[in-house]
Amino acid sequence: MYRFSYAEVIEDSSRDCRDREYQLFDQAISKMKAANGKPSQSLEMLEAIVFVQRLWTYLIKDIGHPDNGLPDKLKGQLISIGLWVMRESDRVVRGEHNNLESLIDINAMIQEGLK
């Protein structure tokens, strides 16, 4: 029978979460790259925007949860980034522009931090 310490279980669980988050960012970035430059109301664009907004809605909720162990300063920074992503993606949906480069870049930077 295997015995694991609580710290090992938590570490594995945390690593698994980071891996899943990394994969979700990978999907978001791929969708945005495929949609970049297409019309704001195109199927590709809307799928990309909905995906990235759902991802950040989940992340903001998780980061803001009282049990989240991240340092408060980092929580604030990530929530600010998430709110910017939401505002910027709303601008795309409203047809103000269809350039996703800045959204792709910021999501790639966050993804890199998960390695």
Image: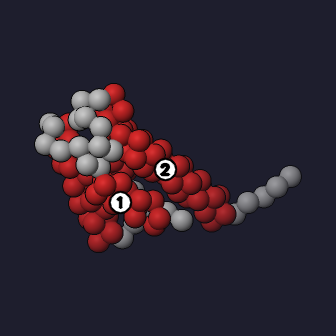
Which residue is pictured at 49% across the width and 50% down the height? 26
The colour scheme of the drawn protein is secondary structure
Q: 55 or 93: which is nearer to us?
A: 93
- Please give the label number shown on residue 71: none
Residue 29, given in percent of the width and then of the height, sits at 42, 49
Residues packed near mark 1 inside 10 Å, few (<14), some (14 to 19) or many (20 plus): few
- Residue under pointer 1: 105
Residue drawn at (33%, 44%), measured in percent from left and top? 36
**Number of numbered discs present?**
2
Disc 2 residue type (three-letter): Asp
Task: Identify the element where label 1 is drawn.
Answer: helix
Quadrant hosting residue 12: bottom right
Closer-to-camera residue (4/35): 35
Residue 54 or residue 71, whichever sits in front: 54
Give the vertical position of 79 relative to 24 (above or below): below
Q: Is residue 98 above or below residue 8?
A: above
Residue 58 visible in the current orientation = no
Question: Residue at the location (18% across, 44% down)?
Answer: 97
Q: Which residue is mark 2?
A: 26
| Image quadrant assignment for residue 57 | top left
Q: Position of residue 85 (x, y in %)?
A: 26, 52
What residue type is disc 1 on?
Answer: Asp
* Residue sitting at x 29%, y 37%: 38
Question: Can residue 111 be seen by looking at this rendering?
Answer: yes
What is the spatial separation of the Cα atoms under label 2 and label 1, in whole angstroms? 12 Å
Query: Would you call the spot at circle 2 few (<14 residues within 10 Å), some (14-19), or many (20 or more)?
Result: some
Displayed quadrant of residue 35: top left
Horizontal and vertical percent for residue 109? 40, 64
Nearer-N-terminus badge (2/1):
2
Q: Secondary structure at mark 2?
A: helix
Tell me the quadrant of the picture where the C terminus can be found.
Answer: bottom right
Horizontal relation, residue 38 to residue 55: left or right: left
